[in-house]
Image (cartoon, rainbow, N blue to C red):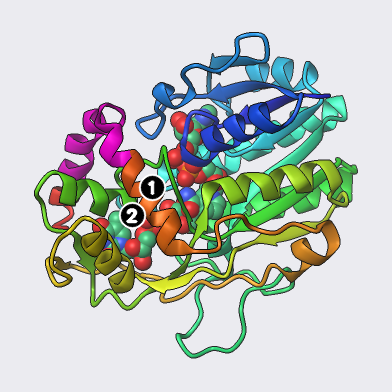
Amino acid sequence: MSHILVTGGAGFIGSNFVRFVLDNTAHSITVLDKLTYAANTASLQGLPASRFALVQGDITDADLVDGLVASHDAVVHYAAESHNDNSLDDPRPFLDSNVIGTYTLLEAARRHGTRFHHISTDEVYGDLELDDPNRFTESTAYNPSSPYSSTKAASDLLVRAWVRSFGIEATISNCSNNYGPYQHVEKFIPRQITNVLTGVRPKLYGAGANVRDWIHAEDHSSAVLSVLEHGSIGETYLIGADGEKNNREVVEMILQQLGQPAGAYDLVTDRVGHDLRYAIDSTKLRTELGWAPRFTDFSEGLASTIAWYRDDPAWWEPQKKAAEARYTAQGR
Ligand code: NAD
Ligand code: TDX
């Protein structure tokens, strides 16, 4: 039984991980979160006070981070600025949180000998052609495209350097695109679901041909727990669930599941530098740690996600207007 510090635990994937760990283990959790626009404390409501606490604070605050890292057995580091479109408008917060924030946590983990797991993304590998038979593996060269993915790549390299130079006990996981409950409405799937629920047509960037490799957030959580508990120190594990779909297919499924005509979407201005395709080969995680995803049917996972947004408008309505105002300013 351990006391785990989860950074960014009021965001989408972090809050799913907190629930997963509290439901399936005896570990207790402290969340450290700055509560940026992307956070939602409603995602953490109803958790057992004996095993859960929330601290509002910034991972770049070295004094705060030092005390928290010293008093926990492990750190699982989710906190980051996470949205590519925002990083194209204003990169600076991505450098602060993703690079300096990770550095600040690593230094504390080094001082206190604390186990550290770093959460990252497949976007550090750049993109693939649609017909490329290869998928990303742990040995694919880093080639990030956006300010977001380049700061995530920088943070991964810091972790690797701190393992090699200072011997910290760290692991890294790079996961593909997550979907599921508690995802901010700026992101692709919840944006389109909540658009349809509010009578607005879904917005597809470019021609909608870009491919993402979708994984349910609960499967990401089970994989991270598995790496935290059984992963080899210094190793990187890729997390993916063989969920490749192009954006047009996803929008058409959302429209169909919500009873709308398949073509009831708009094509809008493409994202600058838009990565074409991501695809993960998760053989290492599956063979070395015996992990397997539970959500293997995307259509079913999408249906439960749509039901969650339909049933809980109070969770997302307060953030919808501001998110759409940012898109309107970008012409999307
Ligand atoms: P999110 O934007 O929903 O949540 C990020 C959380 O981090 C928010 O609660 C925010 O308040 C917090 N945060 C941001 N800056 C902070 C700071 N300086 N100090 C403390 N807290 C801060 O993001 P998400 O989609 O849940 O992603 C979580 C992590 O998973 C990120 O590291 C991201 O790179 C990674 N990841 C995401 C995906 C995906 O599909 N969303 C896929 C692979 C990896
Ligand atoms: O309205 C939209 N229309 C659209 O076509 C939005 C918001 C997005 N898109 C496209 C862009 C991408 O091809 O959908 C795809 C998914 O977009 P995002 O949800 O913005 O995700 P992406 O840029 O792929 O990055 C996500 O997965 C990897 C997360 O936001 C990252 O944090 C994670 O690292």
Q: Residue 148's spot in the image, x, y percent?
A: 46, 54
Instruction: Give me the residue at 32% from left, 78% from top.
Output: 209
Instruction: Report the magenta stretch's main SS.
Output: helix
User: Which segment is the magenta one?
Assistant: 309-326
Q: Residue 48's spot in the image, x, y percent?
A: 60, 14
Nearest the viewer among 64 and 79 is 79
Nearest the viewer among 174 and 153 is 174
Q: Which residue is mark 1?
A: 305
**Quadrant occupied by the N terminus:** top right
Nearest the viewer among 179 and 163 is 179
Is mark 1 in CB contact (under 8 Å) with mark 2?
A: yes
Decide: few, some or many residues near mark 2? Use Cα within 10 Å; few <14, some 14-19, many ≥20: many
**Quadrant occupied by the C terminus:** bottom left
Determine if residue 164 is in view: yes
Q: Indicate yes or no: mark 2 CB to ligand 2 under 8 Å.
A: yes
Camera-nearest label, 1 or 2: 1
- Corner quadrant of residue 300: bottom left
Determine if residue 85 is in view: no
Which residue type carries mark 1? Thr
Residue 319 forms part of the magenta stretch:
yes
Q: Which residue is mark 2?
A: 189
Residue 94 forms part of the magenta stretch:
no
Q: Using the numbered discs, state the Cα–Cα distance from disc 1 to disc 2 in whole angstroms.
A: 9 Å
Instruction: Give me the residue at 58% from left, 23% from top.
Output: 32
Nearest the viewer among 239 and 109 is 239
Q: Residue 99's spot in the image, x, y percent?
A: 58, 44
